[in-house]
Amino acid sequence: MDSVSGASSYVPPPTSATTTTDTMLAQLRSDIKQNSQDFKTALNANDLAGATQAFATVSQDIQNASSAAGGTNPFAPSGPIGKDFQAIGTALKSGDLTAAKQAFAAFKTDIKIAGRAARAQNAGATTAANDGDADDGASGAGPTAAAPASPASPIGSILNASA
């Protein structure tokens, strides 16, 4: 089960505007997943031109998805994931496939770490919010199971899954 479907029961019915955005984001996620796989395949095949093209496409996909979601690029240059992502691009531009592979390995590791941290933080917040007190809702039924946690970002989970 993905993070979006697990939370669907907590989300109000979509309006036509959110349906359009959701459809667009779903397509962008699909594009990112496919293009990330293309990048990984080219990188593993030592295909510098293919890896460079696929990386450029993934970069554009990420920009498009971030804009469509109303946010900023999840790979901020100041963070470890952003630095890894930049290192991949730099290595590809210089023609260094070994460095690109090393940066991609670091990127995948940092995505996993960020995902675990986000899930742990989300689980803690959900558990605290449903602690059996008066603010848990009208039922007063006590603590409830935590909802499935979402990864650090949809983009990160897609890249991690295809890695």
Image (cartoon, rainbow, N blue to C red):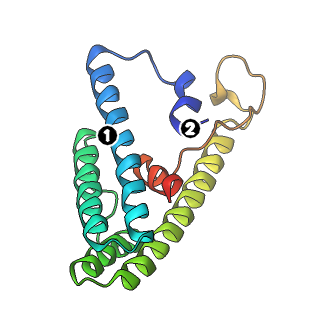
Whether residues under marks 2 and 1 lie with C-beta atoms below 8 angstroms apart, the answer is no
Residue 78 appearing in the image: no
Could you tell me residue 22's position as x and y percent?
Answer: 34, 28
Q: Residue at x 29, y 64 (%)?
A: 50
Q: Is residue 157 above or below residue 145?
A: below
For numbered disc 1, what is the local secondary structure?
A: helix
For numbered disc 2, what is the local secondary structure?
A: loop
Q: Residue at x 36, y 61 (%)?
A: 39
Residue 140 appearing in the image: yes
Q: How many numbered circles are shown?
A: 2
Q: Is residue 132 above or below residue 117?
A: above
Compared across the picture, whether 120 is left or right of 97 comes to right
> Residue 21: which quarter of the image?
top left
Task: Identify the amino acid type marked 1.
Answer: Leu
Q: Which residue is mark 2?
A: 2
Could you tell me residue 19's position as x and y percent?
Answer: 33, 20
Which of the pair 126/16 is nearer the observer? Answer: 16
Which of the pair 66/159 is nearer the observer? Answer: 159
Task: Identify the amino acid type marked 2.
Answer: Asp
Q: Which residue is mark 1?
A: 28
Give the class, few, some or many, for how many residues have Cα within 10 Å of label 1's Cα (few <14, many ≥20).
some
- Indicate which label's residue lies in the foreground, 2 or 1: 1
Could you tell me residue 47's position as x and y percent?
Answer: 33, 71
Compared across the picture, whether 137 is left or right of 45 comes to right
Q: Residue at x 33, y 26 (%)?
A: 23
Q: Is residue 104 above or below residue 128?
A: below
Give the class, few, some or many, for how many residues have Cα within 10 Å of label 2's Cα (few <14, many ≥20).
few
> Residue 1: which quarter of the image?
top right
Q: Is residue 101 above or below residue 26?
A: below
Measured Cα–Cα span from mark 2 to mark 1? 16 Å
Sequence-wise, the earlier of marks 2 and 1 is 2
